[in-house]
Amino acid sequence: KQEVTQIPAALSVPEGENLVLNCSFTDSAIYNLQWFRQDPGKGLTSLLLIQSSQREQTSGRLNASLDKSSGRSTLYIAASQPGDSATYLCAVGGGGGGTSYGKLTFGQGTILTVHP
Amino acid sequence: KAGVTQTPRYLIKTRGQQVTLSCSPISGHRSVSWYQQTPGQGLQFLFEYFSETQRNKGNFPGRFSGRQFSNSRSEMNVSTLELGDSALYLCASSLRGGIGELFFGEGSRLTVL
């Protein structure tokens, strides 16, 4: 069974700080990893997708890395802004045996607050 | 390009009733997945459909069912509602047959009284 853990559970930082969110997974036989953002009461917005053959992906102030062999990913947010406040979710596709179609295994998320 | 559309956005039901939720995927996407999100359990996979066929199913009781139509639109149904079914139900679509990047809708918030 694939299990995903995110650390920390919550993070509060002043505006302008660079920060790192961590994600670990138990089965390294994944085909991809996605980072999502969720605002309160809303759906999930895809931030970055890393295929299992890739080491990192970048989009604007966001950079995600993947170390499949150690079962870890990090999401780096540069120069944080109050608008970055949200819950950040890490999800892996594959691993844990069984069929993988359409199935992502999610972590519990990191609640990020960026205060002015 | 329109995103994933889910209806209704909010609904209230009572125990024992049934509910049907609808999802329209991104144009051209043929894979649709459903997830349940609750404060206690987080996001859990319900099932996935591709070309009107269920290819994958999560660990939920048989009260949870779904289907997909020829235009890729999908519905999920929950029968004999229980209080614990109160949740945000999220639909996601994928271009690469369900193993690629998933794009989520805004969800349907179900409250069971």
Image: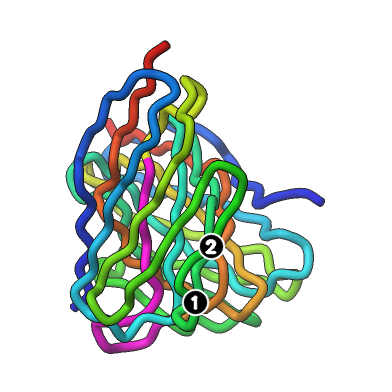
- Judge from the rendering whether residue B19 lies leftward or rightward of residue A46; answer left or right: left
Secondary structure under badge 1? loop
Up the image or down, A16 lies above or below B13; here it is above
Mark 2 burial class by Cα count in 10 Å: few <14, some 14-19, many 20+ = some
Residue at position x 20%, y 58% from top? A5
Which quadrant is home to the C terminus of chain A?
top left
Image quadrant of residue B83? top left
Residue located farthest toward the right when viewing the structure as drawn: B1
- Residue type beneath disc 2: Gln
Residue at position x 35%, y 64% from top? B45
Q: Measured from the top left, where is residue A14 in percent x and y?
A: 35, 19
Q: Chain of mark 2?
A: A
Q: Does the magenta portion include A92?
A: yes
Q: CA distance from mark 2 to mark 1?
A: 8 Å
How was this image coloured? rainbow
Q: Does the magenta portion include B15?
A: no
- Residue type beneath disc 1: Gln
Q: Tell me the residue that label 1 is attached to.
A: A54
Q: Measured from the top left, where is residue B46 in percent x and y?
A: 37, 65
> Which residue is more in the foreground, B109 or B102?
B102
Up the image or down, A74 lies above or below A33; here it is above
Determine if residue A40 is in view. no
- Judge from the rendering whether residue B29 lies leftward or rightward of residue A95; answer left or right: right
Q: Which region of the structure is painted magenta?
A: A88-100
Which quadrant is home to the N terminus of chain A?
bottom left
Residue at position x 52%, y 50% from top? B21
> Which residue is more in the foreground, B108 or A24?
A24
Q: Tell me the residue that label 2 is attached to.
A: A57
Task: Give yes or no for contact between labels 2 and 1 (Cβ–Cβ under 8 Å).
Answer: yes
Q: Chain of mark 1?
A: A
Q: Which mark is residue A25?
A: none
Secondary structure under badge 2? strand
